């Protein structure tokens, strides 16, 4: 399963001490040009009880040496256990990928759940994905749908798209294409636009409209979504062959097998794959 979420990057300090806040802000500004000085300042802030500084320093160390990665994981867990929501989620993320610790999806799910229960929208979506695939937890579509819905209601685009998919297919919840369309519109992601096009083309939960379907597919394609490119190309191949062929080529460059097969059937050259995913 593709690990689709980056860790939380903390750039704001919620510590009530104005001096700590000022020092934290200075450290963040120095992070790129003078990382060693930034680290020193963050360690001083940590000594004064700033958990956001723990996470910020953990962010920096998470891309360093093995020892630094181990310290980053320690900082994330300490911040999380102190109630920092970003520390909770980053602990789950580190465990899911094995950053500074042994990879452990079961433990990752436990940390994600703590962050999710604290209202972290991304963690709620993370947890939904784990339940969806049975990764670190028992596979459970109802639980996945529950957490996706929470994430969606908290405004996280990926959670909105995932919940929309569950509604669209009736997975873990009662099938409701009209409600799915609402969440896809709220998300606006390339994947969501692709699904909106599917619904409008079929007239499922929304008024049937080929024009709207093509409009959404164009937007999704412009955003780089290969599935939208191949779907749009298949719809317009007889109307605009040149554009359709260009879409197939772009999708094939991303490794989309449907596009590769289409180009082969059309007798056109197969481009080198530039990007495997999507």
Image: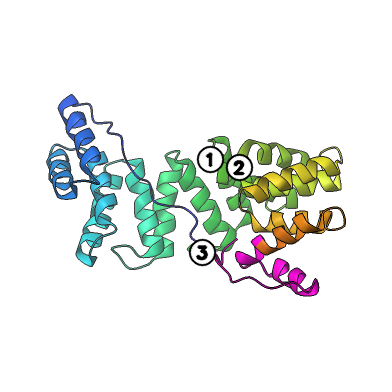
Q: Which of 188 and 164 is in front in this view?
A: 188
Q: Nearer the viewer, residue 22 or 77?
A: 22
Residue furthest to the front in view is: 242
Q: Can residue 275 be seen in this view?
A: yes
Q: Quadrant of residue 28?
A: top left
Q: Is mark 3 on a helix, strand or loop?
A: loop
Instruction: For label 2, count other residues whose C-alpha is less than 10 Å away and answer few (under 14), some (14-19) or many (20+).
Output: many
Q: Nearer the viewer, residue 112 or 240?
A: 240
* Residue carrying label 2: 160
Rounded to the nearest angstrom, the CA distance separating label 1 from label 2 is 6 Å
- Does the stretch in magenta take in 39? no
- Label ID, residue 135: 3
Residue 201, horizontal then vertical, whole percent: 83, 47
The residue at the point 40 percent across, 58 percent down is 108
Instruction: Tell me which numbered mark, 3 or 2, is placed earlier along the sequence.
Output: 3
The residue at the point 26 percent across, 42 percent down is 82
């Amino acid at each position: 399963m593709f690990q689709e979420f980056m860790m939380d990057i903390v750039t704001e300090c919620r510590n009530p001490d104005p001096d700590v806040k000022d020092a934290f802000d200075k450290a963040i500004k120095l992070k790129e040009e003078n990382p060693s000085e930034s680290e020193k300042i963050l360690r001083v802030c940590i000594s004064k009880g700033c958990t956001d500084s723990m996470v910020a320093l953990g962010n920096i160390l998470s891309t360093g040496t093995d020892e630094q990665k181990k310290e980053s994981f320690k900082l994330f867990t300490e911040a999380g256990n102190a109630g920092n929501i970003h520390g909770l989620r980053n602990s789950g993320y580190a465990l899911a990928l094995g950053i500074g610790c042994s990879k452990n999806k079961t433990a990752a799910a436990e940390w994600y759940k703590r962050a999710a229960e604290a209202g972290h929208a991304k963690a709620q979506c993370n947890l939904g994905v784990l339940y969806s695939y049975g990764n670190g937890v028992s596979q459970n579509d109802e639980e996945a749908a529950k957490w996706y819905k929470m994430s969606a209601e908290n405004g996280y685009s990926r959670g909105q798209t995932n919940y929309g998919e569950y509604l669209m297919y009736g997975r873990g919840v009662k099938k409701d294409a009209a409600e799915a369309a609402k969440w896809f519109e709220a998300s606006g992601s390339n994947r969501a636009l692709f699904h909106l096009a599917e619904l409008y083309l079929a007239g499922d939960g929304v008024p049937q409209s080929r024009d709207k379907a093509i409009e959404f597919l164009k937007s999704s394609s412009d955003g780089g979504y290969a599935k939208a490119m191949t779907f749009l190309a298949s719809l317009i191949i007889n109307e605009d062959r040149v554009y359709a062929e260009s879409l197939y080529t772009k999708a094939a460059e991303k490794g989309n097998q449907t596009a590769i097969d289409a180009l082969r059937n059309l007798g056109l050259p197969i481009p080198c794959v530039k990007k495997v995913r999507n």
